[in-house]
Image: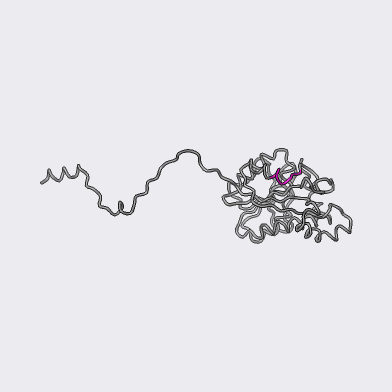
Amino acid sequence: MHLDVQDLRNFYYRSALGRAAQRAVRDRVLRMWPEAQGQTVAGFGFAAPLLRPYLKDARRVMALMPGPQGVIPWPAGLPNVSVLCEEMLWPIETGRVDRLIVMHGLETSENPTAVLEECWRTLGPGGRALFIVPNRAGLWSRSDATPFGFGRPYTLSQLETQLKRHGFLPERSTAALYQPPSKKRAWMKSAQLLERIGGRIPAIFPAGVLLLEASKRVQAPIGPGHRLRVPSPLEVLAPKPVPESAVGRNRDTV
């Protein structure tokens, strides 16, 4: 079940815990994708907080928000790039997207297969998708006070298996949100320190979310195909034989 878009907006933009979570996840995303010069970047679910760094240099940015969730105009103060869409039918041409970010769109969907099929369809050759999901072993998936406490949490192996079944090739992974999902001032002040420690020694604090980058896998065509014969240079340079019919006509005229 998707969360309401108003609740998501209030968490990420109007609460201290949400702004800290936004900063932690966005920093991880930027480490993996530092720029998107001239590329088409799309986000599905509620990925808008992670798309802002790409507005300046990307060729196009789209924030796709599913119908059950709802949509808000985004970004504030700039031309709107958010779109209300169906989970099974995105208003994007096949193979148009270069970079795709999915957050609060997979684990909350009642039909994750359809979501992954649309991800695969819209992603272009050489494109990459970044799936951000709650970590089953983390504290954030156990708290109803954050959006990561709703839907189906994943382990990394579960997410990799699901992506492979739908034509994706997992490339690399990371994690974020090592701070507890608490609004207490002591935890809030130590949020950045915990992110640094957790990134280096993840065994101390389980991460709240998993980030998995995957590429689009295209199967090779099946069948014998057609043999293509390429002539050698000697055959190209050799004089062409005269057809027998032409030889006969020449003899008749003589």
Q: Nearer the viewer, residue 139 or 188?
A: 139
Residue 251 lies in the magenta-colored region: no
**Residue 181 in the figure: left or right of residue 214:** right
Residue at x 30%, y 53% (from the top left corner): 234
Residue 155 lies in the magenta-colored region: yes
Residue at x 69%, y 52% (from the top left corner): 173
- The span picked out in magenta is 153-159
| Quadrant occupied by the N terminus | top right
Residue 141 pos. (x, y %): 80, 46
Q: Nearer the viewer, residue 80 or 151?
A: 151
Which of the 4 image quadrants contains residue 194?
Answer: bottom right
Q: Outermost residue toward the left? A: 254
Number of marks present in the image shown: 0
Residue 99 pos. (x, y %): 63, 53
**Residue 246 in the figure: left or right of residue 206:** left
Name the colour scheme.
one colour
Residue at x 75%, y 57% (from the top left corner): 199
Residue 251 pos. (x, y %): 13, 44
Residue 200 pos. (x, y %): 75, 58
Residue at x 64%, y 48% (from the top left corner): 170
